[in-house]
Image (tube, rainbow, N blue to C red):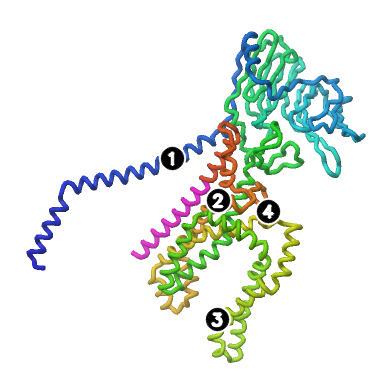
């Protein structure tokens, strides 16, 4: 091409580049990219705002509004509404032989002592009352009742309301457990109180009179924390609470008198959850000790829902950490081999094949683990553990034979035989563990599993399946970090006389350490948020134990299980959004820190290489 042709071509290209349409296309493309970025940011903000908004009710408390109605309006309201879900009337002090809800015990009191007699037997147990027993009420929960006690301390009168439950112990028989709900000092007029319960919220209502004033108190039935405390307007002082019929409904209460009716309406009852109920061990009704429990569908309507999320957090943490123990040796070992030791041809073949495994759906891995891995674990667990223990011994023995031959001057014989000897010993060890003594080991495992553990739904199987699922992610990022180390540093180490193992130990791994740490953190985030594998392989039992042979339920799997049956405005839905927010924040923070480590690592390498 001559000079004239080059000049014409340059002029044509310049003319093409200076067309006004080119700048318009650039502006349109730049605007589209900016709009896409803004759409992603707005979607992220909408997601996090929704989670925070739906989880925020744990930060505030329910509200109660009281309205005074005319008697004719009250008759219409009480007629139109369904029967009360929980009507708690105070019992007379002299009432005898009240049966508890289980109909197995008979309750009475004599001389300020509560006596419980087991039916069809002569077994009795008494509970002394510290003060004057004024009234009591039977709860909707089995073997639970409330007592009102009047005491005198330092010339002042004290009213106490206690919840007492009857526990059946296998060794000592029956026992009492008391919880103080309310304590209030008063001046002259003896106060009265009526206690009510809620069937779908962990709430206890207390309506009491104090020196002529009527008050309302709302408590969390698990932690006994006060949620709402206010005076009831519209009730004259001269009206005694004993003359008022107090009826509790699911979302309101009615104080009915011959001359007036006061309606109390509850709102935002789904905010009755407290932080202590979510994260602290609680002593639930029917349990002897404080425990971490998750049970959102109890057998009785008025039984406490157990919304403690610590079993879910422990389940997610246990599964993800054990998965890392499986994934880190597999992923980092493969990354080191492919990124440093493998020839170029093998590297170009293995890396895409391993990265393709990342695209396998987790539901497919969960299905394979549930159908194939669980029976295999039951059949070959002890054989596999024995192989893991004896493998280093066999390799060290082979190397010891090589050193012994070198000491006797026979190095030339074993130089080419060491690798073959190691392969032979490994194959012999595989046969010995999985075939030679597999029969006695399987019999031992069968007896041990039946008597002690259950392997079909244990954390061990979940860890293996989940570790295999996150291994391609850790491998890809770790191999990129190892490949990003400058080749000049490796050559410099070789020029100084370092072996390949020394170069790996003192040059390659320290330089790629930030990228490897970020890869492990991203793998941990994926394992923590994994749903289908944990859902399909485990028994989904919310147990707050770190035992690897016990079951678990993860946060993500719990959302899938319980979201369809949760009420829209129930406390259950609020707790589910709290768990979703915790899951989101954990994975978001973990991935953000990992990306920050990767960014600083890349930036430092660029400055070093430039």
Picture quadrant of residue 122 = top right
Residue ID at (69%, 70%):
438
The numbered mark at residue 45 is 1
Provide the secondary structure element on which disc 2 rests: helix
Q: Is residue 550 toward the left or the right of residue 38 in the image?
A: right
Residue at horizontal 59 percent and vertical 48 percent from the top: 554
Q: Secondary structure at mark 3?
A: helix
User: Do callouts 1 and 4 mark residues in contact (Cβ within 8 Å)?
Assistant: no
* 597 falls in the magenta region: yes
Image position of 117 (left or right of 390): right
Q: CA distance from mark 4 to mark 2?
A: 19 Å
Residue behind mark 3: 419
For the point 65% across and 73% down, the residue is 390
For label 2, the residue is: 532
From this view, report whether residue 81 is shown above or below residue 533. above
Mark closer to the observer (4, 2): 2
């Amino acid at each position: 091409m001559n000079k004239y042709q080059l000049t014409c071509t340059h002029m044509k290209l310049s003319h093409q580049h200076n067309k006004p349409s080119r700048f318009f296309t650039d502006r349109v493309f730049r605007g589209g990219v900016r709009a896409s970025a803004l759409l992603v940011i707005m979607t992220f903000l909408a997601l996090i705002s929704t989670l925070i908004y739906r989880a925020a009710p744990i930060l505030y408390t329910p509200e109660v509004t009281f309205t005074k109605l005319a008697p004719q309006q009250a008759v219409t309201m009480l007629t139109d509404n369904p029967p009360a879900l929980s009507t708690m009337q105070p019992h007379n002090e002299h009432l005898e032989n009240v049966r508890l809800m289980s109909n197995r015990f008979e309750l009475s009191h004599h001389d300020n002592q509560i006596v419980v007699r087991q039916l069809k037997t002569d077994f009795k147990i008494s509970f002394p009352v510290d003060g004057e027993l004024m009234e009591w009420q039977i709860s909707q929960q089995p073997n639970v009742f409330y007592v009102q006690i009047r005491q005198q301390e330092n010339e002042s009168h004290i009213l106490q309301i206690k919840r007492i439950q009857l526990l059946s112990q296998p060794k000592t028989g029956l026992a009492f457990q008391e919880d103080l709900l309310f304590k209030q000092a008063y001046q002259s007029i003896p106060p009265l109180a009526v206690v009510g319960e809620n069937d779908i919220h962990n709430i206890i209502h207390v309506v009491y009179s104090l020196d002529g004033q009527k008050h309302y108190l709302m408590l969390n039935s698990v932690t006994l924390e006060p949620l709402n405390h206010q005076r009831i307007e519209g009730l004259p002082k001269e009206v005694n609470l004993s003359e008022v019929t107090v009826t509790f409904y699911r979302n309101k209460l009615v104080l009915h008198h011959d001359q007036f009716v006061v309606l109390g309406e509850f709102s935002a009852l789904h905010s009755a959850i407290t932080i202590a109920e979510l994260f602290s061990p609680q002593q639930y009704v029917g349990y002897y000790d404080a425990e971490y429990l998750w049970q959102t569908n109890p057998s009785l309507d008025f039984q406490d829902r157990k919304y403690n999320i610590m079993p879910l957090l422990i389940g997610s943490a246990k599964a993800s950490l054990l998965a890392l123990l499986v994934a880190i040796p597999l992923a980092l070992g493969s990354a080191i081999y492919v990124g440093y030791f493998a020839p170029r041809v093998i590297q170009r073949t293995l890396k895409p094949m391993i990265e393709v495994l990342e695209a396998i759906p987790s539901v497919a891995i969960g299905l394979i683990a549930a159908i194939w891995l669980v029976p295999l674990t039951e059949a070959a667990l002890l054989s596999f553990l024995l192989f893991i223990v004896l493998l280093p011994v066999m390799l060290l023995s082979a190397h010891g034979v090589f050193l012994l031959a070198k000491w006797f001057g026979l190095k030339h014989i074993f130089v080419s035989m060491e690798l073959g000897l190691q392969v032979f010993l490994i194959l012999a060890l595989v046969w010995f563990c999985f075939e030679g003594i597999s029969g006695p080991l399987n019999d031992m495992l069968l007896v041990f599993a039946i008597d002690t553990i259950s392997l079909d739904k244990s954390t061990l199987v979940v860890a293996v399946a989940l570790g295999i699922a996150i291994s391609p992610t850790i491998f890809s990022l770790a191999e990129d970090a190892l490949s990003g180390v400058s080749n000049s540093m490796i050559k410099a180490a070789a020029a100084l006389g370092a072996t390949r193992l020394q170069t790996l130990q003192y040059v390659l791994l320290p330089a790629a350490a930030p990228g490897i740490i970020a890869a492990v953190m991203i793998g941990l985030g994926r394992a923590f948020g994994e749903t289908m594998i944990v859902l399909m392989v485990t028994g989904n039992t919310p147990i707050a134990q770190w035992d690897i042979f016990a079951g678990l339920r993860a946060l993500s799997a719990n959302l899938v299980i319980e979201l369809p049956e949760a009420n829209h405005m129930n406390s259950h839905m609020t707790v589910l959004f709290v768990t979703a927010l915790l899951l989101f924040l954990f994975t978001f923070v973990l991935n953000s820190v990992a990306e920050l480590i990767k960014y600083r690592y890349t930036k430092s390498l660029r400055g070093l290489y430039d």
